[in-house]
Image (cartoon, rainbow, N blue to C red):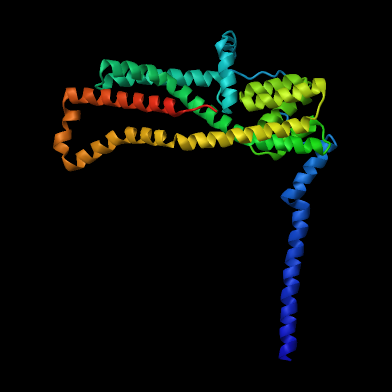
Amino acid sequence: MDMVFSAFVVLLFAAVILLIEGAWLWWSGTHGSAARRITRRLRTMAGRGEGGERVTILKQRRYSKWPALEKALRTMRQTALLDRLLLQAGVRWSVAQQLGSSLAFAVGAMALLPLLDMPLLASLLALAAAPLLPWLLLLRFRGARLRKIEEQLPEAADFLARALRAGHSFVNVMQMVGEEMPEPIAGEFRFAYEEINYGVPMSEALHNLALRVPLTDLRYLVIAVLIQRESGGNLAEVLSNISRMIRARFKLLGQVRVLSAEGRLSAWVLGILPIAVGLVMMLVNPKYISVLWTDPVGVRLLWYAAMGGVFGVLWMRRVIRIRV
């Protein structure tokens, strides 16, 4: 009796396990990520893609919410360059917001600097640097986004080559990259695909892609596609070669970063060492070092030391930055 009961328990346990596994396999096969990916590909092949329609018919980005300011900004040539910079950074700011933030920082610096006991040279430098802070932030966002796209570009080129070998058209492959690759490179290819859907010639859409993403490797890819459309050739093989070239350049860049690690460490040490020594002196002998912020000459020396430290760090960063 005990053996029969034990066998029944074992068989019941196995049946429950198989039931759970079967339910999981059914769900993953019909509703899982792989099933959704296959569904998207089938819709792409059938010409019924789900690409979002986020390109306006006018193909114009608004510079401001106010029509009068929009009209005034449209008359300036430099605002188009600023709008392209915002587009490359992938931020949701408008041209008017960027210019307004610079103006706000400049007004804030003019109101705050008289309250600080700063030397004349430091005050002038701070007044000149305050409006540039939003631009430095924008350039930082742009650089980070372009670096991420550059890291994703070899995988995107391999994806394009594999899909072309499988028999897909290049337009459908662009949509597949926009749907299956991670951001931000997916958004750029999706934008180019939507432009083509609106009737923009493929050559113009690819040129716009190269303008939005000013990377040399992406320009190689765009040039290869345009040449292949005019003269023919094995585009999949060309894209594979471009992917290998980008990966080889990344490998060389990694070796350069290893060789320049000592210089970067020196920049960090030289930048942090004065601050660390000052903090230690405040703990060991605060009366000795307090003359730097109690005496007017000491305050002036502190400002000069801060400017010299910032200049030195920026100079060392420029020296150790090597383009590959």
Give the camera-side residue of 314 and 251: 251
> Which quarter of the rendered picture does the C terminus lie within?
top right
Residue ranking furthest to the bottom: 1
Q: Is residue 296 above or below residue 268?
A: above
Q: Is residue 172 above or below residue 301?
A: below
Where residue 161 appears, x then y in whole percent?
75, 35
In this image, 205 relative to 297: left or right? right
- Number of numbered markers: 0
Residue ranking furthest to the left: 287
**Residue 55 visible here:** no
Q: Residue at x 74, y 77 (%)?
A: 12
Q: Residue at x 18, y 22 (%)?
A: 297
Residue ranking furthest to the top: 75
Q: Residue at x 78, y 20 (%)?
A: 201
**Residue 35 visible here:** yes
> Which quarter of the rendered picture does the N terminus lie within?
bottom right
Give the camera-side residue of 135 and 218: 218
Where residue 77 appears, x then y in whole percent?
58, 9
Q: Residue at x 38, y 16 (%)?
A: 128
In this image, 65 relative to 261: left or right? right
In this image, 20 relative to 264: left or right? right
Where residue 239 appears, x then y in whole percent?
72, 32
Q: Is residue 103 above or below residue 265?
A: above
Give the camera-side residue of 78 and 255: 255
Residue 200's quadrant in the figure? top right
Residue 20's quadrant in the figure? bottom right
Where residue 98 appears, x then y in whole percent?
51, 21
Residue 172's quadrant in the figure? top right
